[in-house]
Image: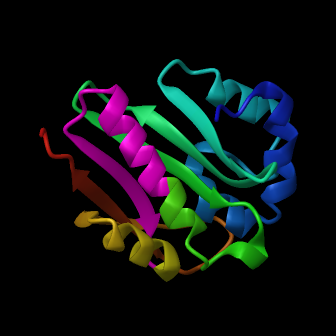
Amino acid sequence: MAFESKDYSLLIDWIDSEEFNLLWGGPIYQWPLTLKQIDTHLSREDVSPLILIEGGLILGYIELLRVSEDEYRLCRVLVVDQNSRGRGIGKQLVQRSVDYIREHFTAKSVSLAVFEHNQSAVGCYQSLGFQTEKLENYQPEFTDETWVLLQMRLMLSLT
């Protein structure tokens, strides 16, 4: 289901720290998150924000980014309720997004980026067939630690 402008304030509620903002959103959003930043980013024609709803509750958030006709990118994957993380909701959200891309577009691959220390997310993506293509170092402003960013890809079958 589409994530609409009336829902933007929910993102501000869900993203509760500078570290989580970077872990979830990468460098697209600066901390603290604002409605203006969200509106500016989500107004782009190549970005499609979606939410996973079951039983009237929003369980997850994800963005589809059209890189080209051959590639879509999954961005800002979020299981909304911290207590629900690790229960397969993220996997369901990513799988449904990949299925949607397969059904509606001519993409040959789906890519994403995830920080290596986010092992639950890395494991989720690997279990769905995503493979690491490249490693990049990233230096967050709020720590002296260097974070390793994994660039991952899933090749879509053309059958």
Where is 147 relative to 28, above or below?
below
Q: Nearer the viewer, residue 122 or 135?
A: 122
- The magenta region covers 94-116
Please say which color scheme the image uses: rainbow
Please provide percent x and percent y for residue 23. Answer: 60, 65
**Count of all numbered marks drawn on residues in the image:** 0
Question: Which quarter of the figure has residue 148?
Answer: bottom left
Q: Is residue 62 visible?
A: yes
Residue for point 47% across, 81% down:
119
Q: Nearer the viewer, residue 35 or 109?
A: 109
**In the displayed structure image, the side of residue 37 where residue 49 appears, left or right:** left
Residue for point 55% across, 30% down:
48
Residue 103: say if magenta. Answer: yes
The quadrant in which the N terminus is found is: top right
Residue for point 71% across, 74% down:
84
Residue 47: say if magenta. Answer: no
**In the displayed structure image, the side of residue 3 where residue 120 appears, left or right:** left
Q: Nearer the viewer, residue 87 or 6?
A: 87
Please provide percent x and percent y for residue 139. Answer: 51, 67
Q: Is residue 117 visible?
A: no
Question: Which quarter of the figure has residue 122?
Answer: bottom left
Where is 111 relative to 3, above or below?
below
Where is 62 relative to 65, above or below?
below
The quadrant in which the C terminus is found is: top left
User: Residue reaching furthest front?
Assistant: 55
Q: Nearer the viewer, residue 102 or 24?
A: 102
Please provide percent x and percent y for residue 128. Answer: 33, 66
